[in-house]
Image: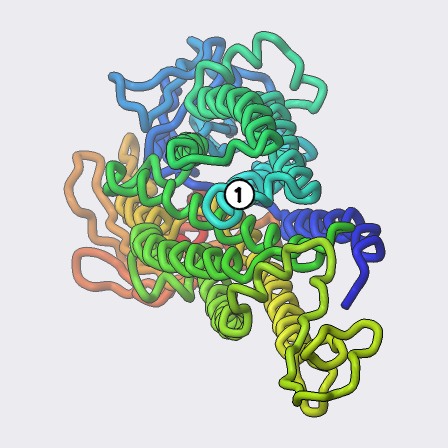
Amino acid sequence: MHTGPARSVGTPLTALALVVAVFALVLGGAGAAFAHAGLSGSDPADGAVLKAAPQYVTLTFTESVSFSEDSLRVLSPQNERVNPRPARHVDGKDNTARVELSGKLPQGTYTVAWRVVSADGHPISGAFVFSNGKPSETAAVVATGSPDDTAVGRLYGVFRYVAYSGLALLVGAAAFVLVCWPEAATVRPVRRLLVLGWVALTASTVALLLLRGPYETAGQLTSAFDPAQLGRTLTGRPGGALVARLVLLAAAAVSLRWVARRTADRTGLGGRLRWAGALFASALAVTWAAAEHASVGIQVALAVPVAVMHLLAMGVWLGGLITLLLLLRRRGSDGREIPASAIGRFSALAFNAVAVLVATGVYQSWRQVGSWEALSTTSYGKTLLVKIAAVVLVLCAASFSRRWTARLGHEASPATATAALMPAVSAPERVRVAQGVGAPTPAAGQEPGGAAEAPAGDGPGDTAEAPRFEADAYRRGLRRMVTAEAVLGVVVLVVTTVLTGTQPSRAAGERVAVASAAEPQAQVVTVPFDMGTANHQGTVQITLTPGRVGENTVEAVVYTPDGGLATVPELRLSLTQDALGIGPLDAKLKNLKGYWAAYDLRLPMPGVWTLNITVRTTDIDQVTVRDTVRITSLPG
């Protein structure tokens, strides 16, 4: 049996190693988050060539958005801003943004750069172009990377992971003390774990509150202390949730000190305190659920409480595992160990927590994924598959832990459990043996009528130490399985945190569907040409369907000056992309008696293509005219 002092020296190092492992694994998974909403349409449309300058630029998104003064910028070909006033919602619709443009815009290509905050608190950004009169070169430069791929974005993501870790440590350790073993509150490593969880959650919440402003606006790190920006953060829903979390944590600090005094006085922890702890933990989890995925989408009234239960179950299970592991690795100078009954109570508590995790996780998966196909075709679905695999491994480890717990509980009789809590070894048991009349006088150390004192178990074949040996072996086996389960639990926590920063599959599918419906189904270009007679100018209308990269259908119709259909002997069309040196690609139009068409024109690249249109008006006269068309990328 290990001595007390040897174990007590290693306990702080063990606690430190566990905490470092948690944060190393959590921070190691930090990555860029994906957008949670999308641009479903714009007016003017991306790539549009307008005959007259527009008065407004209007954007429509798949869900409600919020924005700051610089959220929507319209830049001229010379990279000058041409929207003097900030964006506003259109007719009170929260999923729109509109800016008014300057009165007179010169011809050329304009760039629209936008960055807004989606309803679940994550920033999204993008850019597109339109042309007034005719396309031109532009000097406007906008960021094209992920909105989180900045110094502030990466730092914000790190503190999000720290906040989840602090929640797990605080809720799990408190649940272990209140439900499984109240005397654990007097154990120094457990008290340190509670303090560490509180400090990590409080510090990360303060950091998130300061970084929220520059995170939303893509500002510099130094702007985190800008009073005006902080004021805007406090009025938003994410900022309000963070402030509420700080208030709850301040109340928790007072409560923890009161609980510490109660346990120091040996006055015990009652049922009311357990209910108060459950209420506090639920309120703390609401500060996440009310400002993230659960707060938008379908079935919000059900999704928010389900998300709260999911967070609490995660904290009770993972934080409780780390608390149990600390207690299993500890044996203080007084020789006290965690009793088998407390381990059994945590086993039941952890089983219920995992059951809640699975049930709420199934609902959240259905709500966010939406279809079986999305599991393998979206980032959210693929990340969810990783989480499911990690949960399966956790369940396997948990089943082995329950087996070791059952064996330990079977071996620990009430007498053994009591002896395990005694600071000193019990006195040897005296064994009375019958003695015949006239026997010799008892020797020193013997009682009259009895044999010499001998500690129980000294006789041949006695196995009094066997239960103690087996109990130690069971504790070692349980400690190994709890370690494995805790490590896998940290992996689940990492993946869960990544999921909160990933666009849900259902939202991605809706975004593609709305975007596809909003996109123009064809690109139409009308080009005038000289018909060879005085004051006779006809037009040729070219229609490319769908006007995207890949195979397109081309239809061409020639009109007379009065708008009637014109018959021409020959019509040729070729396309070139001068910027990349591609072309000319011959459309190979065929005369279909009234119009010309081709059904297999394949365009390999997006961008602005030049249309070269040759119209033969007579057997000897022909004219070639040119115009441009913007070909877009494939959706998705």
Give the image's coloring scheme: rainbow
Amino acid identity at mark 1: Pro
Counting the numbered discs, the total is 1
Relative to residue 476, is residue 258 depicted above or below?
above
For the residue carrying disc 1, how many other residues have a C-alpha within 10 Å: few (<14), some (14-19), or many (20+)? some
Taking depth in this image into account, of 471 and 394 the one nearest to the observer is: 471
Q: Residue at x 34, y 49 (%)?
A: 512
**Looking at the rendering, in which quadrant would you find the N terminus?**
bottom right
Report x, y in % for residue 522.
30, 48
Residue 159 in percent (x, y) is at 63, 36
Q: Is residue 489 visible?
A: yes
Residue occupying the far front of the picture: 438
Q: Residue at x 17, y 61 (%)?
A: 593
Residue drawn at x 64%, y 11% as measured from the top left: 226
Residue 303: image x %, image y %? 30, 42
Residue 522 vs 527, above or below: the answer is: below
Whether residue 445 sits left or right of residue 69 in the image: it is right
Q: Locate residue 428: give its quadrant.
A: bottom right
The residue sitting at 63% across, 61% down in the picture is 419
Q: Quadrant of the C terminus?
A: bottom left
Q: Residue furthest left?
A: 564
Task: From the viewer's side, name the closer residue of 164 and 220.
Answer: 164
Which residue is disc 1 drawn over?
A: 182
Who is closer to the viewer here, 85 or 555? 85
Left or right of 13? Residue 507 is left
Picture coordinates of residue 600, whole percent (x, y): 35, 67
